[in-house]
Amino acid sequence: MMTEAAARDTLRRALAEIGFARLPAAECFALLDVEADDWRQFADSWNNLGPDLYMADGGRYRRRRHATLFSEYGRIVRQSHQPHFQSRDYNPLNGDVQRWFDPVASATVENPVMPAVFRLCLHAFDPSGAGRWHIEMHQFRIEAQEGSSGRPTPEGMHRDGVDHVFVMLIDRHNVREGVTRIGTADGTPLGEFTLADPGDAMMVDDHRIFHGVTEIHAIDPRQPAWRDALVVTFATT
């Protein structure tokens, strides 16, 4: 079985060579090393997200919370609540707007899962440990309702306008599809896969890689259906 150090080296090598890395749930949880009760409490916080009211396509299929943090020499400090902003160069649908979302609950940021995620990402993105990072944490719930689909990335294949992106599936309930697609800036596809199990994750070099997720549809349209994901972005300052 691969050691933790070897697994981290494999992540860094994949990011350097091909610009993205996949982490199956078992490997991700082994690296995070968190208790099952902590994970359950962390995942349960996705049941208390407010609606995203900024969708330019008129959709009401997305719920979210947002937090901003700062890291220097591996020390992470939460910042005062502030809007999420992307230019239209990176988000042609919802860009050039200051979007204020409900803040991530303190208990969620402080849950042992999040410090473990931050450590995992900084080991992969900043091996020297000397970087200064603007970090944004997003809790997303995409809902599929009877007669309508949910769109995890309504802007299509995109970059986020940062340096690195971490995406982890929290839950899939009564949904099909939601395929992650990876490609280059010139449109060359590099692969596709589905984050299917809680803890399935990926890391992306945002300078080199475009990514997107296909629509989700309810398996049983009479029942609630959703896809929960954690997205954490890192930008040098």
Image: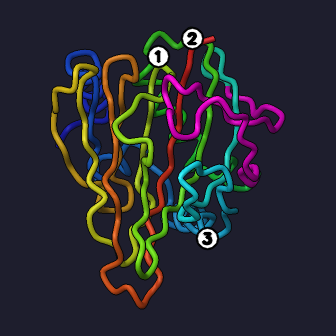
Q: Name the residue under label 3.
A: 47
In primary-sequence order, the first of circles 2 and 1 is 1
Q: In this view, does 72 lie above or below 210?
A: above
Q: Do the residues labelled 2 and 1 touch (CB within 8 Å)?
A: yes
The quarter of the image holding the C terminus is top right
Give coordinates of residue 47: x percent, y percent. Answer: 61, 70
Task: Compare residues 17 and 143 and report the one nearer the observer.
Answer: 143
226 relative position to 21: left or right: right
Q: Mark 1 points at which residue?
A: 126
Q: Name the residue under label 2.
A: 131
Give coordinates of residue 20: x percent, y percent. Answer: 28, 29
Give the CA separation, mark 3 to mark 1.
Answer: 32 Å
Range shown magenta: 76-105
In the rendering, which numbered label is found on residue 67? none
Give the CA separation, mark 2 to mark 1.
Answer: 6 Å
The amino acid type of the residue labelled 3 equals: Asn
In primary-sequence order, the first of circles 3 and 1 is 3
